[in-house]
Image: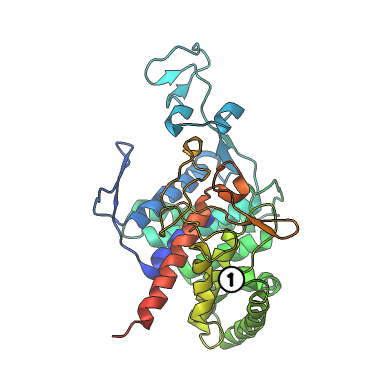
Amino acid sequence: DATVRNLVNTWETFRPERDNTSVDYPKKYVDIHVPDGKPDLLQQIEHGTLALVAQFRAVGHAIPGIIVPHLAQYTHLGDGLTMTDNLVYNAEMGELESDGFRSGVFDDRWAFTSYSSALNYGSIAALAAASRALKGYNDELASESFETATRAWDEEQSREPVIFKHGNTTGGPLPVEVLNASLELLVTTGEQKYADSFMQNFSEIEKSFARLAVPAVRAMPFMDEAYRDKIRQLTLAHRKHLDEISLENPFGVRITEGGWAGNGSVINMAMNNYYLHTAFPDIIHEEDVFKGLNYLFGTHPGSDLSFVSAVGTRSKKVAYGMNRADFSFIAGGIVPGVLILKPDFPENKEDWPFLWGENEYVINVAASYLFLANAVNKLLQNDLPN
């Protein structure tokens, strides 16, 4: 959900029309470095939207995820194509039997369909956003996305929420997911009921402004002057927060100390700062945005490697992707980054890709990086002399 929303935000804010990939759904064929006349970003939004819509078509709600049935597949090494025979499993066939369409090899992915209102609201937000971006590009999918989002919203609003939480697969805190869903529907429709729902959950923004500044700013065109004044006061407090962070280390960003390294948090903070800069440039400055990308590109503890593979003169070349067993990389992938080992030792292993918390590529981080890279480029262009 977050991946689709970040891609839509990038499209609507910067409209990058780069075309470097051919995608042919009828043929199930993709070819990079071959333009097909369609913006790659819209094709990525389309692909994610199809996955979300398919869940509602199949079971009527968002699902926690899809995963392989066997541990051997999960820990699979080598070419990703060998993880499956690409044939539909038929229990009546032997393991070595196949008719070219079905086989007796039990390697088909499983969909886990537990219901969670938080997860449902997350998909509502993504589908509402996607409906805007896809309009004029894939009108049929845009229409289905909007209809699915509004129908699911009405259903959720008509009953008590289903609270089911399991790890990171069933959505974030329910009020935050409702906040995001109401915002995307508000931006899409302009209807007052969504503005009302957004304000009913505004306390979430007040409690965690550093994390929710983006929806706070995006809602401003639909709110009154009192709302703007409230966001300005929160931004002034955020300024003090940023100044405190700048004293923690020489890099000017918050380096998290959990079991998963913090590049995602660094990017999200920089994204927040970009939105706040556009709204209140006298409080939040361009440098508050630049610091995030500078950190990602090599201004961080432990080394000067860019954490974006193939971006920079020296970049991350050993990472946990589909080709991890080759000790190799996927261009454009972003790793979690520097892990702080107690008491304060920075680590990012360049000779061992299998440490997930340091070296695993994560798709939603790549989507947020696309926004940040375009944001910095926009700011730099504005600074160039005419």
Q: Position of residue 256 (x, y in %)?
A: 67, 62
**Which residue appears at 44% of the width and 50% of the height?**
49
Q: Position of residue 272 (x, y in %)?
A: 55, 72
What's under tag 1, amino acid-wise? Phe
Considering the numbered disc 1 on the image, is that residue within a helix, a strand or a loop?
loop
Image position of 145 (left or right of 385): right
Rendered view: 2 above or below 165: below
Q: Is residue 332 visible?
A: yes
Quadrant for the C terminus in the image: bottom left
Q: Residue at x 50, y 13 (%)?
A: 95
What residue is shown at x 62% (from left), y 82% (from top)?
Answer: 239
Residue 297, above or below 96: below
- In this view, the residue in front, 328 or 272, is 328
Horizontal side of residue 57 vs 172, given as left or right: left
Q: Position of residue 8 (x, y in %)?
A: 44, 61
How is the structure coloured here? rainbow
Residue designated by label 1: 251
Q: Is residue 273 above or below residue 134?
A: below
* Percent of width and height locating residue 140: 35, 51
Residue occupying image coordinates x 52% and y 48%: 361
Where 129 sits versus 162, above or below? below
**Few, some or many residues within 10 Å of mark 1 (<14, 14–19, 20+):** some
Q: Quadrant of residue 180?
A: bottom right
Q: Can the viewer see residue 218?
A: no
Query: How many callouts does the rendering have?
Result: 1
